[in-house]
Image (cartoon, rainbow, N blue to C red):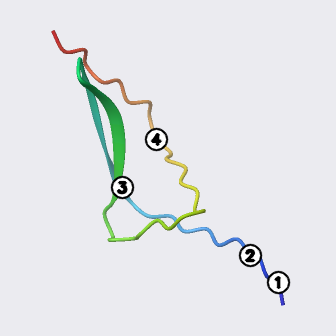
Amino acid sequence: MAIFSRKTERVPCTVEVSHRFESLHAHVRFNNGAVVHPGDEVLVHGAPIMAPSAM
């Protein structure tokens, strides 16, 4: 029995990117309701996302 094991899930997601003077962030929401726990890793596949610069 392995104490540490890896499980891979592929789920659709939505990425929200904000690039403003007071905030620069990116958040990922899993469209199937999946939850990320401490120690989990997330890798998002797809075309690069460019956040428009705020004036």
- Residue lying farthest to the left in this orientation: 55
- Could you say where residue 16 lies in the image, as x and y percent from the top left? 28, 41
Q: Earlier in the sequence, mark 1 or mark 4?
A: 1
**Earlier-in-chain disc, 3 versus 4:** 3
Q: Residue at x 51, y 64 (%)?
A: 10
Tell me which amino acid carries mark 4: Gly
Q: How much space separates mark 3 and mark 1, taking CA atoms?
A: 30 Å
Considering every residue shown, the one lying at the far bottom of the view is 1
Q: Which residue is mark 4?
A: 46
Task: Choose mark 3 or mark 1, whichever is in front.
Answer: 1
Q: Quadrant of residue 29?
A: bottom left
Spatial separation of the CA atoms under disc 4 and disc 2 = 26 Å
> Picture coordinates of residue 43 (x, y %)?
55, 49
> Disc 1 vs disc 2: Cβ atoms closer than 8 Å?
yes
Single out the residue that lies furthest toward the front. Answer: 22
**Secondary-structure class at tag 4:** loop
Residue 23 locus on image (x, y percent): 27, 27
Cα distance, mark 1 to mark 4? 32 Å
- Rounded to the nearest whole Å, what is the CA distance between mark 3 and mark 4? 10 Å
Q: Amino acid at mark 1?
A: Ala
**x%, y% of residue 36?**
46, 65
Residue 5 has which mark?
Answer: 2
Q: Element type at marker 2?
A: loop
Q: Disc 3 on helix, strand or loop?
A: strand
Q: Which residue is mark 1?
A: 2
